[in-house]
Image (cartoon, rainbow, N blue to C red):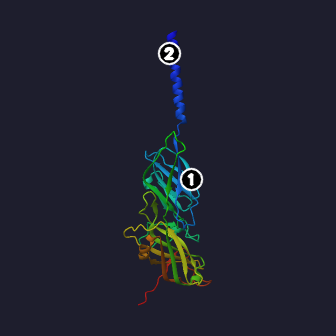
Amino acid sequence: MKKITQYLLIVSIVLIASCQHKELCYDHYHKANVVIGYNWGESLKNYPKSMSLYLYPEDSSAYIRYEFTGHQGGALKIPYGTYSLLSINSDFKNIEYKNKDSLNIFELSAKTAIYLPGTNITASNLPKVKGTDVERFVESIDTLWSDRYLGTVLIKQLWTDTTQVDTLNFTPKLINKQINVSISEAENLKFATGGVSFSISGLAGGYFPYRDTLTSEAVTVLAPLTAGEDGLSVHGSMSTLGDNHKSGVAHTLTVYAILSDGSKWYHSFDVTDQIHKGLDSGSVNIELKGLPIPAPLFNGGGIAPDVDEWQNIEIPVVM
């Protein structure tokens, strides 16, 4: 009987110790207090409306995403671990995510355009210039900001000091490149009542934010043009991911005009040199002269044009 009592006592002690150990394990703090901050230029006025933080664990498990309203960041409780960190704004509508599960091929891609800006004409039916047959027509993109930590970051905290706070700061870089276009001597502009738009081919279709490199895909970006106050010029701008300088890819600016009789016309300019010389600086201004929009072919009499076909505006060569 005495041995049985001793045995039960030993078992009780073991069970009590086990429960106490398990209780301590539950109390152990497994998340670190981290403050995420963002450094913006003093002259910046249009801050992003939201920022996303992506943490990719070193063990290749699923990424963790946090969302901040506004541009200032904030305090988080992040699980202990070693991570690769990436932060981008998330307030855009016409940039698409691809391959988010893999950090090195996580891509931000320009959204495929459905319509020619300012019209109900399907973008996929627009005429393509030589060498751009495989290029997608895409929209001018919203503002994109991005920054990352190269290498990995260890997020760890002594469980005896749960008040300890680490700070991680990002300095987002503006990824967008701006192209401004101005064309003077636009003849018969008053007849283009159906709208005037333009495109530029050979631009980058995607961006790898962690690698900070452009994808190799070349796309054609679409944007609207507006008439100048003089009624003889058109002006427009587009925001792009940039130029990946892919060998052999030219940059063609094409103007599309829909006339009052429903006929559709286009004319192209080679702007390769202007793009290559200026776009890497962040923006480029392209100034062209001469846009010979024809007068309507049909004004209630004569033969109506085939409004389903795009017709090329040819400029005669003066000898």
* Position of residue 103 measured from the top left corner of the image (x, y, whole percent): 45, 53
Q: Which mark is residue 7?
A: 2
Q: Tell me where residue 224 sits by quadrant.
A: bottom right
In this rendered view, identify the residue nearer to me: 79 or 189: 79
> What amino acid does circle 1 point to?
Gly
Residue 146 bears which disc, if any? Answer: none
Residue that lies at the very extreme toward the top in this rendered image:
1
Residue under the image location 40 percent in, 70 percent down: 249
The answer for how far apart the CA atoms under marks 2 and 1 are is 56 Å
Relative vertical location of residue 44 with respect to residue 227 in this rendering, above or below: above
What residue did someone put label 1 on? 74
Estimate the x, y position of residue 119 in percent, counting from the top left. Answer: 58, 71
How many residues crowd around disc 1 within 10 Å: few (fewer than 14), some, or many (20 or more)?
some
For mark 1, give the secondary structure. strand
Q: Residue at left 42%, top 58%?
A: 211
Disc 2 is placed on an element classified as helix
Q: Are marks 2 and 1 in contact (CB under 8 Å)?
A: no
Closer to us: 237 or 260: 237
Q: Is residue 45 above or below residue 166?
A: below
Whichever of labels 2 and 1 marks the residue nearer the N terminus, that label is 2
Judged left or right of residue 45, residue 59 is left
At horizontal 54% and vertical 28% (from top left) the residue drawn is 20
Amino acid, disc 2: Tyr
Q: Along the line of sight, which residue is nearer the eye, 311 or 13?
A: 13
